[in-house]
Each structure stands twice: as structure tokens, then as C-alpha cells.
Amino acid sequence: MIKLAIYGKGGIGKSTVACNVSAALARRGLRVMQIGCDPKADSTSLLRGGERIPTVLQVSREKENALELEDVVFEGAFGVCCVEAGGPVPGLGCAGRGIINALETLEKKGAFRKYEPDVVIYDVLGDVVCGGFSMPMRKGYADKVFVVSSGEKMSVYAAGNICMAVNNFKGRGYASLGGIILNRRGVEGEDEAAAALASDFGTSVIADIDRCAEIPAADRAGKTVFELFPESAAQAQLEAAAKAILDSFGGAV
């Protein structure tokens, strides 16, 4: 089973990339599970026609030990298994701790044994890399971390913090850094900024996605690019990103 995490600053397009990578891998015949680790709980919405699903934390609060996997695992586009960790009641509790609780609940309930995914993708907010937000980097969860960044200053800064966290954990046998996915915003010197970021952390830009009309149009429709714009340049670039991720694991599942 391939286990990976996609991190990125809020608003940089990490969930869009994650959903489209999930779709691309599922179209290859792989069983994919995407787990949203963002308190906004909208990671998987593009795989569900824009619909949000009940979160693990929400259902846990309502049902406690009576929670069943069918309450929190839903089928999305191309058969992707969609899960949202969720967050605490606003103003109460810690979002990071909530992610820890949600992932531990999925493990305790045997989610991976029941659904037998070939690929598990954790979609993680990367503005803060501490506590629960670093949980998918830990041993037993993701094996590799991929960071989505543009060439904008704050995006590169956040991406650098994520890469630093991965490097700080690597001595403990946790996830390694798989590479940078450049989601272009059209700023000056963008490719050079992404290349410098990758070089600073001994990795590479494994995929790049151009700014285009198709991706935001698909987002507005609550769909993946693979559903709305097949054969487009955007679809080809997202397909290439999925292939690069798969290739980084040796192409094996």
C-alpha cells in the first residue's frame, strides 16, 4: 500500500491537486482513499460534486463509540473513498489534536483493513506544521510528503517550513520528502523560486501545473478536471503529477 501526504499553504490549491491526483490514480484502476486533514473539512468536495461529508470528529461527538466506518467513509468520483477528519467545535479544543483523534479512530475501526486501499492520500493544511498537522508525517502513516507551492513569497515560506519539518522527522524513520509540485500563479521568477526551494532541501520539482481557466472552472462546479475537461492541457499536467508521485514509489503498489 502506498501512503503519501500532500501539504501546502491554505489557498495554494493542495486540495485541488489532491482530488485530481486521487482521480488520476483511481482511473488507473487503483483503489484510492483520500483523507482530508483540514478543519474546514472540504478536502474531498471535488470528488463529491461539491458536497461536504460528515467528518470523523463530528460523528464521534454524536455517536461516540457507536461510530461505524460507513458513517464517515463515502464513495467519490471514480470510486475514491472519501474521508474528512474535521475539526473541533469553533472556539473549543485544538484542531491539531482533533486530527490525531480522527486518524486514531480510523485506525482503531480498521478502515484500511475494510477498504483495502492501494493508495492512501492525506491532504494536510500546511500553514502550521505542529501537533496533529504533523501527524501524517509520523511512522505508520505517510511514507512520503509532497508539497504544493507557487512561486509567491508566502507560499514558498510555508513550503519551506513544511520541508524543514519533514527533514527534522526523517532521523526517526518517519516520512521522507517526495518533492515539490509547482502550482503556478504567474508571478515573476516563479520557476526559479520553486527550483531554489527544492534545491535547499535536496529534492526536486516533480510536477508543474500552469495557471489556466479549466482548473478554477472545475473547482466552481465541484468536479475534478478529469470529469469536466478530459483531454485538456490541465488534465495532462495533473495526470503527469500523479504519475510522478507513483513513479517516486517505484511504480509499485
Image (cartoon, grey):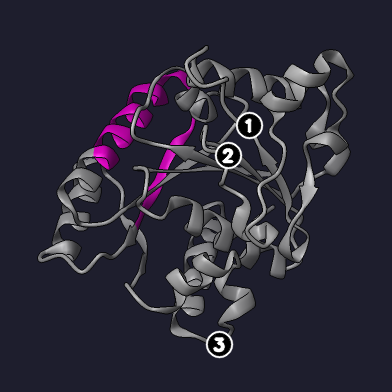
Mark 1 in CB contact with mark 3 (< 8 angstroms) = no
Q: In the visual, does 99 lie left or right of 126? A: right
Mark 1 in CB contact with mark 2 (< 8 angstroms) = yes
Q: Quadrant of residue 61?
A: top right
Please tell me whether mark 1 sits on a helix, a strand or a loop. Answer: loop
Please tell me whether mark 2 sits on a helix, a strand or a loop. Answer: loop
- Which residue type does callout 3 highlight? Glu
Q: In 3D space, how far apart are the residues under numbered discs 1 and 3 (Cα atoms)?
A: 33 Å
Residue 176 magenta-highlighted? yes
The main secondary structure of the magenta stretch is helix
179 above or below 127? below
Residues shaded magenta: 158-181
Closer-to-camera residue (189/45): 45
Pinpoint residue 44: horizontal percent, then vertical percent.
Answer: 62, 50
Q: In 3D space, how far apart are the residues under numbered discs 1 and 2 (Cα atoms)?
A: 7 Å
Residue at mark 1: 85
- Which residue type does callout 1 highlight? Ala
First reached walking from the N terminus: tag 1 or tag 3 = 1
